[in-house]
Image: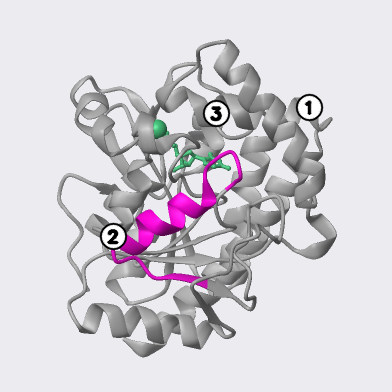
């Protein structure tokens, strides 16, 4: 077992699970504080922790509270993240600032990956990844999720990249960074709300054992960085690409008109798409996180068996 970094505060449950070699699944908190409205966000967070337990693993939601990087939260702490007005969106570059000012921070995929790696947790479940924004070739708006996937040894289960981003450029950036992008049980790269994206997945694996073998193969060779496991939203919950596409275009246009930029883009777009879809996109978002939690728990169990 990797000894968790001393600057982290682990819950007793997570510390015990890691010390005795039981499977643990990391969860991010930006999805709670900035990805969904209250109270659906805290209901989702609690439900997902339950799914991971039912799957035989220990959930470890990650965030910064009062300047302390925390691994494993209780119900009241999840409620704080879901409803407190001053929870910063914290990507990798924001960690030193929120820690030094002793603030609350909701961690993105990038910063959650880094903290999970420092805690010794190799599997992490989320909804959607950040990537290269449309126009990223000139704006340089490329999420630190991409560079972190090249750095931290964590497998990240998501439902792919939304078409609010440029999916083709994101796949290219991940290839350059040496990040395996592997679709679970499909040839098509999924695009979060939709099972299809018009892009072929670079790799396909059909079993959790196969995914666990990839993790072991990568890290046994000393290849630094993560694996992006993409899991399509269940067919009954998806919003087909041609239906969500128009709403995404409209939300992007409004984003431009209002001059929203940088880290505020993704939360604005997610919120607008919920409004424009009359709440349907939120149901899809919750359904795909549940689905990812089931896969992530199974993957953590399978990987633990190999180690
Ligand atoms: N996509 C979602 N919900 C989210 C995010 C992305 O559907 O909550 C969050 C994740 O935490 C992701 C972050 O890591 O947005 C990316 O933000 P940025 O592009 O500013 O790096
Ligand atoms: Mn950005």
Q: Which of 205 and 70 lies nearest the eye of the viewer?
A: 205
Residue interval drawn in magenta: 162-182
Q: Which of the labelled discs sits on residue 177, or is there none?
A: 2
Question: What residue does disc 1 label?
Answer: 276
x, y percentage for residue 297?
Answer: 53, 70
Quadrant of residue 160 within the rendered picture = bottom right
Whole-Å distance between the Cαs marked 3 and 2?
A: 25 Å
Q: Earlier in the sequence, mark 1 or mark 2?
A: 2
Q: Is residue 254 left or right of residue 99?
A: right
Q: Residues within 10 Å of mark 1 (few under 14, many from 20)?
A: some
Magenta-colored stretch includes residue 175? yes
Quadrant of residue 191 within the rendered picture = bottom right
x, y percentage for residue 15?
Answer: 31, 61
Q: Which of 228 and 298 lies nearest the eye of the viewer?
A: 228
Residue at the image position 69 percent from the left and 34 percent from the top? 248
From this viewpoint, is residue 228 visible? yes
């Amino acid at each position: 077992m990797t000894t968790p970094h001393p600057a982290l505060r682990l819950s007793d449950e997570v510390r015990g699970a890691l010390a005795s070699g039981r499977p643990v699944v990391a969860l991010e908190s930006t999805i709670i504080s900035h990805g969904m409205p209250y109270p659906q966000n805290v209901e989702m967070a609690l439900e997902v922790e339950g799914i991971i337990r039912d799957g035989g693993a220990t959930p470890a939601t990650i965030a910064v509270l009062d300047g302390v990087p925390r691994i494993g939260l209780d119900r009241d702490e999840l409620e704080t993240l879901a409803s407190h007005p001053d929870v910063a969106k914290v990507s990798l570059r924001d960690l030193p600032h929120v820690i030094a000012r002793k603030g609350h921070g909701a961690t993105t995929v990038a910063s959650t990956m880094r903290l999970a790696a420092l805690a010794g947790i190799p599997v992490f479940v989320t909804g959607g990844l950040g990537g290269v924004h449309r126009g990223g070739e000139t704006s340089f708006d490329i999420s630190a999720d991409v560079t972190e996937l090249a750095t931290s040894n964590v497998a990240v289960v998501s439902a792919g990249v939304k078409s609010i981003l440029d999916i083709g450029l994101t796949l290219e950036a991940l290839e350059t960074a040496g990040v395996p992008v592997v679709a679970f049980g499909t040839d098509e790269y999924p695009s979060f709300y939709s099972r299809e994206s018009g892009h072929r997945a670079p790799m396909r694996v059909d079993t959790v054992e196969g995914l666990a073998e990839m993790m072991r193969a990568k890290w046994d060779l000393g290849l630094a960085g993560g694996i992006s496991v993409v899991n399509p939203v269940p067919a009954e919950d998806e919003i087909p690409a041609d239906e969500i596409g128009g709403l995404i275009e409209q939300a992007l246009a409004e984003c431009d008109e209002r001059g929203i930029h940088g880290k505020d883009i993704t939360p604005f777009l997610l919120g607008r798409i919920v409004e424009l879809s009359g709440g349907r996109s939120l149901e899809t978002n919750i359904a795909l996180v549940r689905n990812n939690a089931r896969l992530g728990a199974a993957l953590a169990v399978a990987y633990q068996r190999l180690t």
